[in-house]
Amino acid sequence: MTTPEENPDEAERLAYEARVRRRVPILLKYLKEGKLSVADKLAPQVRESLAKLRYDAQGELVLDSVDEFIRSMAIYPDYLESREETKSIASLAEIQRKYFSVIESNFGFIYDKMVEANWTPQRTAEHFADAREETVDHLNESIDELLAYFTEFWQATSEVAYTHLEDAHSSIKAVFGGDMFPRDDENIVSKCGLYADTVVLPDPFVRTRMHFTKWSKRERVFYMVKHSMNVLQYKVLAVAEVDKPIVVILPDKELMPEGELEEIARLGAEDCVFHCSKLFGMPFKSLEEVDAYGRTLDSIDKAIASVRSPERLLINAEDQSDLKQQLAELCEGPAKLFAGITNPGQALVNNSFGRLAVANELILKAAQLSGTPLIEAPTSWEYFKWKLEYDAERANPGLDVSRLHMTRALNELGGRKLEWFGRVPVKALIELRQTGAIDEVRALLSSGVDEIAQSAPGDFEATSQKVMDNINAAFDAHLDNVEKLKQKKWKFAGHDVGSWLVSGAIEVTAACVGTPIWGLSTFALNQFLDAPKLKDIPKDAKEIADLSKKVKRSPIGVLFKYKTYE
């Protein structure tokens, strides 16, 4: 007689039987609790199959009584139950609070200094990286231990966190990518937090942990401090008590299963071949062919001269220097440091491959979370658009264009006359969520965007203009509503409405930050002028109260309240 360890087939049979015994009770529970609906045409089959189920004297399910219909039907409830069990390990809020608590306990004192000095994370990191040798040594000696902690932390919690987000089907999620982390001189959630319920940011420590092995001591301190300051800027949003998290930080490709990394590399290679075929005007068939050609371009002049589509030669969209200088810096910088490449042609190929692989990684991560890619870095944005273009050429479109338009439009509003709207304060975002006004804001912002997206998928300028027009119109309407309410001449019991409103409460600023008409009996009583008794107020008074409340608590009213922060 062989044991399951000696007979793989026997081991598989026993494992399968165990799965059936687990699944059937879960199926019965889901049917009883109404968590699983059955189509009318399948109901007779379900009843017939369930009637066959038998149990032995010990109450154990007799496997022979479970037909194939029930076995198949029980797979999905078991999958759902497994996800619920995973999520029960810890809440997403608990995971985020623990993550931030570790960073704060180690770098909170530096963050407080940064806030007090009104510095950016970049400036703060430079300060500590340039500090005395003893200070740098002290900060540096704990870096490896912290990186190991974050790796272990996410290995234990990332599946739970991802499952929570994946199952948040009603949430609109924006998944950041294209750079280590958002820019440190502004809050990216202030740009797009109105449209997206949850902005998913990468853990910068895990994302760059391999770089720490190549950086110098002072570079290590610089990036550790900068990452910490960047992350702590989002703490109040990440731990805010709202129904749907505003910010969630998750690890990305550094902790992906090996198969997913291989898929990202494969897709990046395909796109790199497609891109380089256009860039050099040659029909490459494989990445090996592209790389071999790149090796022949052993000087900067050769590499630049070989380009046939100069509009697709992009190293750094924000660098105003000439391409020769940019390519020289690429060869002496990232290409050499992280890939050991100094050949200019190979550096161009490697740059294209890396950028397009990152675009694919972001698309896969966004798809996994049912989210929309969110890109801030101009260079990454251009490569991302090319990746979508190449997919379209290969008849494989894969994004909700209207969502992409909305996210990008809000991202681009900064720099226009409504710049403050691209810097909506954290307090305003949290209040919009807590008051439930966010849906109305989104309806306002997205008005007309679908039509633009469908007619001109690449015209993000038109989308941005449409969103700005929507905002302008909304604020104009808001001011009109305030003025109309202020000018109403309704009288009750011989008293003008204006005589029993708090002085100034219906001015624009007070309309947005003030208190409702009713419920003011003990508030600023000396501001009232001969206020009528409640018993003298006719039923139409409710209309005034409703109008006042609507003006003040409307989403635009809430936003207008914070406009003084600009």
Image: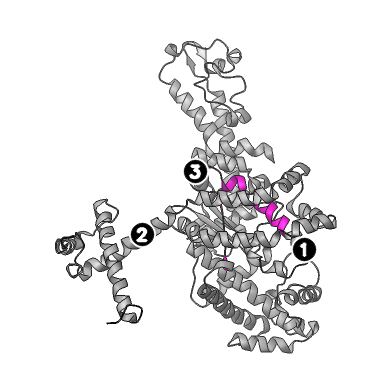
Residue 348 in sight in this render: yes
Up/down of 473 relative to 499, above or below: below
- State the mark number for residue 376: none
Which is more N-terminal, label 1 or label 2?
A: 2
The quarter of the picture where residue 508 lies is: top right
| Residue position for label 1 | 219
How far is mark 3 from mark 1, CA to CA? 46 Å
Q: Quadrant of the C terminus?
A: top right
Q: Amino acid at mark 3?
A: Glu
In percent of width and height, residue 104 lies at 65, 48
Quadrant (top left, top right, bottom left, bottom right) of the N terminus? bottom left
For disc 3, the neighbor class at 10 Å (few under 14, some 14 to 19, many from 20) is few
Q: Which residues are magenta?
A: 224-253
Residue type at mark 1 is Glu
- Marks 3 and 1, the one that precedes in the sequence: 1
Tag 2 residue: 80
- Give the quarter of the image for residue 333: bottom right
Q: Residue furthest front?
A: 1
Q: Is residue 352 magenta?
A: no
Identified at 19% across, 60% down, the residue is 58
Under circle 1, the secondary element is helix
Viewer-side residue, 61 vs 501: 61
Q: Are marks 3 and 1 in contact (CB under 8 Å)?
A: no
Q: Nearer the viewer, residue 397 or 424?
A: 424
- Tag 3 secondary structure: helix
Contact between marks 3 and 2 (CB within 8 A): the answer is no
Q: Is residue 127 left or right of residue 399?
A: right
Residue on which disc 3 sits: 440
Q: Residues within 10 Å of mark 1 (few under 14, many from 20)?
A: some
- Judge by depth and name the residue closer to the eye, 44 or 489: 44
Q: Amino acid at mark 2?
A: Leu
Q: Residue at position x 56%, y 71% from top?
A: 360
